[in-house]
Image (cartoon, helix red, strand yellow):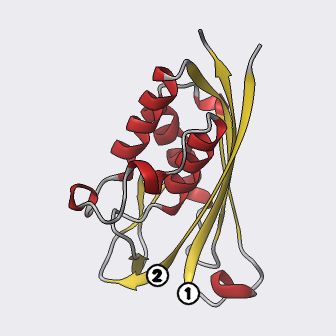
Amino acid sequence: MDIRIGHGYDVHRFKEGRKLILGGVEVPFEMGLDGHSDADVLLHAVMDALLGAIAAGDIGQHFPDTDDRYLGADSTVLLEAVGEILRENGYTVGNIDSTILCQRPKLKNHIPAMCRRIAEVLGTDIGRVSVKATTEEGLGFTGRMEGIAAHAVCTVVRIR
């Protein structure tokens, strides 16, 4: 059985006047994240992990921030495209484990919806998707409320 592992990391700074989208879910908060797309830092880390697992580059190669087609893009649409790239290369999601690093907002009540949304977009079982959140105890850029970071690891399994 061909099983591969991928890792993804992303970070975006806070920006006033934008919606906060994490894991494909709108999270009520006074600021959103700055980016060319919707700046969904969690989905960006997940996509990089999945692409990395099959040695297919990263989201910057597939959806460059220099291309206006992706200006304000919904990252769930991009995640769906990454799922198609996996299938075209003969792989499916084994599992995804991710962590969001932010001081605020508190995300506990939004995590189940994020897991459901990621599983739905990728066409996989919700039991294969884990999202966690942690503060950094006031340390670093996330602790100073400058932005949010996310890590994701995944396994992908060859289906053909």
Please identify the residue farthest to the bottom as the structure is shown.
Answer: 144
* Secondary element at image label 1: loop
- Answer with mark 2 or mark 1, whichever residue precedes in sequence: 2
Give the residue at mark 1: 146
Quarter assignment of residue 64: bottom left
Percent x, y for residue 98?
67, 51
Decide: marks 2, 1 in contact (CB < 8 A)? yes
| Distance CA(mark 2)–CA(mark 1) | 6 Å
Tell me if 149 is positioned left or right of 121 in this view: right
Residue at 77% from the left image edge and 82% from the top image edge: 137
- Amino acid type assigned to the residue bearing label 2 in the image: Phe
Label 2: few (<14), some or many (≥20) within 10 Å? many
Q: Which mark is residue 14?
A: 2
Percent x, y for residue 114?
52, 48
Residue at 54% from the left image edge and 46% from the top image edge: 57
* Secondary element at image label 2: strand
Location of residue 146 with respect to 5 vertically, above or below = below
